[in-house]
Amino acid sequence: RGTAGREHRASDRGGKQQRGEGRSKAASSRVGAACSDAAFQNAKQGKSKESLRLLQTGIRLGHSPDLKAFNAVIGSLASEGQMDGVKDCLQSLQAVGLQPDTSTYKILVAELASRGDAQKASDVMYLARKQGMEVDAEMFDQVATSFARADECRKARECLHSAKAAGFASSRAAYIAVAHAFARCSGGSGARDVLVDMEAAGMRPTAADFGVVFDAFARQGLDASMQETFDLLPSLRLAPDLVAFNAQIAAYSRAGDVRGAEATFEKIQATGLEPDLTTFQNVVKSCARNGFGR
């Protein structure tokens, strides 16, 4: 009886210990879940470092956060340029047996592109494609526009071409952003080519859109190229209307070319169009800027 009693008491103590450990683990898991919830809320409030700390604390306490929590923290870190934190978060994500999904990559591309990290955004997008994730036109637009804002014209246009090759239609806004980048950096010919690409993609540019091309050629003093572009408009189903003529005059005005502005004014009259207030304002501005106030 004594041996049996001792074994029974030992078994009872072992059972109590196991039950105590179970309760402790359950409590830790509940605290871990609370940490994950807090991490999600902190991420939404832009507290990126605190959100990562809470997420990792929850994992150490035995809780496995869901992908939604990870994506929120990753987005918050990326929006503040905390790329080391993003890497840590991705490692933690994989450590709990999860894998990045399309939303993960979309968040990263959007945040990086908006911060001006165009090359990183591009790298992440192509990594997503390599891993078989779905990408979309919006991601290509974000990368192309980010390159355009950084005046990396060639990469911006290549991104538009890649989108088309992948079966996506880039937005009008993306084409215009890239055209403006070319106009700022390499002159009118690159900007004109992008607008021609835009028309070939099924989005007709307006005569006003060509104003940026006229501006670039006027700054370069390339009157012949400006006229060549103007003559191109009918092939793009654009009538050389008063809007187009006014854009030309405005370009000459900004470039300080009075003679160019006056010659275009004469062309308006020769075609039978009636100059409007904008026409006269641009001609007057051109004259005033060059000391011909009278």
Image (cartoon, rainbow, N blue to C red):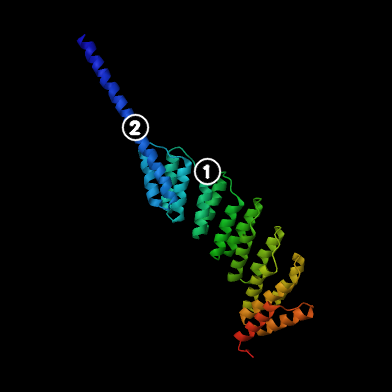
Quarter of the image with the N terminus is top left
Q: Residue furthest bottom?
A: 294
Q: First in sequence: mark 2 or mark 1?
A: 2
Note whether 239 is above or below 75 in the view shown: below
Quadrant of the image occupied by residue 38: top left
- Please report the residue visible at 43 percent of the width from the left and 49 percent of the height from the top: 43
Mark number for residue 101? 1
Amino acid at the residue labelled 2: Lys
- Please report the residue visible at 52 percent of the width from the left and 53 percent of the height from the top: 109
Note whether 13 is above or below 166 in the view shown: above
How crowded pointer 1 is (Cα within 10 Å; few <14, some 14-19, many 20+) is rated as some
Quarter of the image with the C terminus is bottom right
- Please report the residue visible at 24 percent of the width from the left and 11 percent of the height from the top: 4
Indicate the position of residue 271 as horizontal and vertical percent values.
79, 78
Amino acid at the residue labelled 1: Asp
Indicate the position of residue 168 as horizontal and vertical percent values.
65, 52
- Please report the residue visible at 52 percent of the width from the left and 57 percent of the height from the top: 113
Quadrant of the image occupied by residue 253: bottom right
Indicate the position of residue 192 as horizontal and vertical percent values.
67, 68
Mark number for residue 25? 2
